[in-house]
Amino acid sequence: MAIPLAYNLRNLKERKTTTIMTALGIALTVAVLLSVAAMFQGLQRSLASTGHPLNLLVMRKGATAELNSIMTPQNFQIIKAKPGIARGNNEEPLASLELVTVIVLESSANVEMNITVRGITPAGWDIREGVRVIEGRRFQPGRREAVVGKGVVARYPAAHLGGKLTFGRGEWDVVGVLDAGTSAANGEVFVDLNQIASDQRREEALSSVLIRATDPVTLHALINDLTTDRRFVFDAVTEKAYYESQTRSAAPLITIGAIASVFMAIGSSFAAMNTMYAAVARRSAEIGTLRVLGFSRLSILTSFFIESLLLSLLGGIIGCLLVLPLNNFTTGVGSFVTFSEITFNFTVTPMIMAAGITFALVLGGFGGLFPAASAAGKQILAALRAV
């Protein structure tokens, strides 16, 4: 004969303070875990969605990022003449010579961070079909004008439309705000290639070339052609593969978050265990009465175990509610690959919340198993003497 669930719900309600404190301990543990998971999910989503499947990024062999790659205009002329490159509306090859550098901006929290500045040509806009200007306009070639990603605008006051950014040899007017969906371009600043190259005195030492292949077969042929051409030493990777590889930049934060979650989980498990042991001690007479009424040891063990699971379920739900406001919150993480900040949004998915509740139930199960066994193991006479 099973003990009714209402019995457990009544006991949790009677011990309001203890129930709430234990549930909050579990909730905080779940919240930390889910925050880390939402951060990684947002970063992964941002980087995985960056780039077109037919876009190819060409850099100097051995370069780990565009920032430490060198590409000359002469190299670019050879690359854009390769067969298999798609052509735009003007029948020109869809190939963009680009310069990537970093500037320092002060965030709204008064913290200085490196931000990626990308010098591009008109072809660079054409290749990036998912990037659109949502406020203002595109920069005009030959002028110190900048178009900033919406993620930069959200975090850095100086980058608002109509503002001025100071880098290179002078000030740059912010004339537009771009929206790149969920891609990493939201955390970049776009400027005219020739102007930034002149300011940086890097007319002959640019960074990379972005090209669009005509089809998937041609894409692989281009990769093979560029990597084996003996006239220069290049690496060619798909744009998607390049950005996906940068998810390792969040590894240190994820590791720290996981370690914190483990320690908090241990503490929460012991808190749940302590709560259930205290409940068993206070309810010895009840346990004896239940045995007299014919409830088996297994029924009592199951009942106390379920009570612990209910307690942890409450904590898991509270933890999910604590993290839910972070969904779509814009933040950034420093990349050890690009040496600049990658801007992205926290992404709290139903799967992440389900994982958090499952994690809470595991904590509650571990914390409630031994007290439940203790309750089930009580002798009838010994339990009744506690009246």
Image (tube, rainbow, N blue to C red):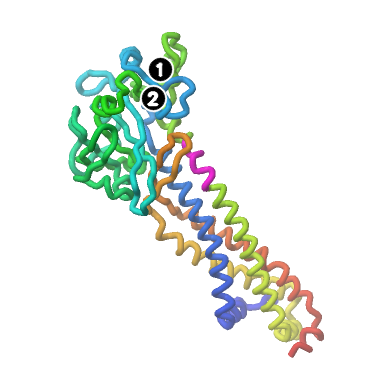
Observer-nearest of 145 and 385: 145
Q: Position of residue 63 (x, y in %)?
A: 46, 25
Q: Which structural element holds mark 2?
A: strand
- Examine the rendered structure and indicate whether residue 289 appears above or below residue 179: below
Q: Which mark is residue 259?
A: none
Viewer-closest of 166 and 77: 166
Q: Decide: marks 1, 2 in contact (CB < 8 A)?
A: yes
The residue that label 1 is drawn on is 222
User: Residue 73 appears in which quarter of the rendering?
Assistant: top left
Mark 2: few, some, or many residues within 10 Å (few <14, many ≥20)?
many
> Which percent across, then down, holds residue 287?
72, 82
Q: Which amino acid does the dot numbered 1 rest on?
A: Leu
Nearest the eye: 6 or 90: 90
Residue at the (29%, 29%) spot, across then down? 119
Residue at 36%, 52% (x, y): give it.
Answer: 110
Q: What type is the residue that disc 2 sits on? A: Leu
Q: Viewed as shown, does residue 248 lie left or right of 374?
A: left
The total number of labels drawn is 2
Q: Is residue 317 left or right of residue 56?
A: right
First to last magenta residue range: 246-253
Q: Is residue 51 above or below residue 204?
A: below
The percent position of residue 61, horizontal first and vertical second, equals 47, 20
Q: Is residue 347 magenta?
A: no
Using the rendered view, name the quadrant where residue 203 is placed: top left
| SS label for mark 1 | helix
Please tell me which of labels 1 and 2 falls first in the chain.
Answer: 2
249 inside magenta stretch: yes
Compared to residue 295, the image places residue 314 above or below, namely above
Residue at (39%, 44%) from the top-left corner?
113
Q: What residue sits right under mark 2 in the picture? A: 56
